[in-house]
Image (tube, grey):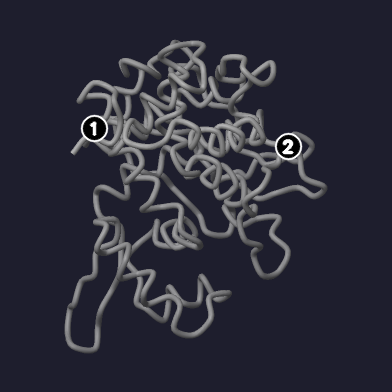
Amino acid sequence: MAITALPPDADADIARVTEALAMITPRWNVRILLALSGPPLRYSELAAKVSWLQSGQLHPKLKALCDAGLVERTEHTARHVTYGHTERATALLPILPMIVTWAEDHLEKADRPLPAIEQIEDSLTLLTRRHAAAILWVLKSRKEVSGRVLARIVMPSSDWTNIYPPLRQLVADGLADTEGNGQPYRLSAAGDALGPVLGTLSAWSAGQPLDQAARHPVWGQPQAKSAPRPWISSQSRPAPAALPPARAVGSSPAWHHRDLFSHAAGRPTAAIPAGGPRR
């Protein structure tokens, strides 16, 4: 069933990207996927890598990731079970450095250097706001659009004034701009720069090679082909030696748990709360 008044292809595209974001955004999911980026691990080995999770928290997270098709549970014997990435999860990994690159340019700088994993979590928080994906799609397609018209497209079966809470949130998050009440809305520079990330997520969620992002009908801009910046969380610090740039789907990224969680001080902090990002 259609979720917006957009053409069916665009509606399906937004639904797939929204579902993909829902798989990876829940708390700790990305950290668990990164911890599993090497050889398959036994439960106890994985638990040691994500030791901040309290007893009983890891198992339901693993089950959800298995149900989403991102983690594979292999039962070798009754007492020997391992967990590892599926091909879908391996194909997802090159998108994560792209998110960090965007965050470095467009999220508000924190008071302390942030590891890459926190940059990812903060960015995903913004993209999973209610109706965010659909609004971003329309703003990119239409350039400028009034709130009333946007409401008819994004939430056609709802009262049109319901568009304003998510719109105000996107403005507060720095992804959309307006000149004031009654004025049209448009993407901000930060929102427009999400093109490579959203285009690549679209390709991944549709089961296509990631390089198809450059041909995306909405987000396929030349900037999607630009070389990724070094993956660091502060320009004043050297880049982690083992972190590669984004790769094609066919290669296997050499993710290293110790590098991805570098600069973290003790127990990881949660992603930013609702109400305002780092910009």
Direction right: furthest residue? 111
- Residue at the (34%, 23%) spot, across then down: 213
Up-down: is 261 above or below 21?
below
Is 190 situated left or right of 56 in this image?
right
Name the mark on residue 12: 1
Mark 1 vs 2, N-terminal side: 1
Is 44 situated left or right of 272 in this image?
left
Local secondary structure at mark 1: helix
Contact? badges 1 and 2 (CB < 8 Å): no
Q: Nearer the viewer, residue 268 or 132?
A: 132
**Residue 238 image position (x, y, % from top left):** 72, 40
**Residue 91 image position (x, y, % from top left):** 31, 42
Screen quadrant of the C terminus: top right
Up-down: is 143 above or below 70?
above
**Residue 89 image position (x, y, % from top left):** 31, 50
Q: Nearer the viewer, residue 221 or 132?
A: 132
Name the mark on residue 108: 2
Which tag is nearer the camera, tag 1 or tag 2?
1
Mark 2 residue crowding within 10 angstroms, few (<14) / some (14–19) / many (20+): few
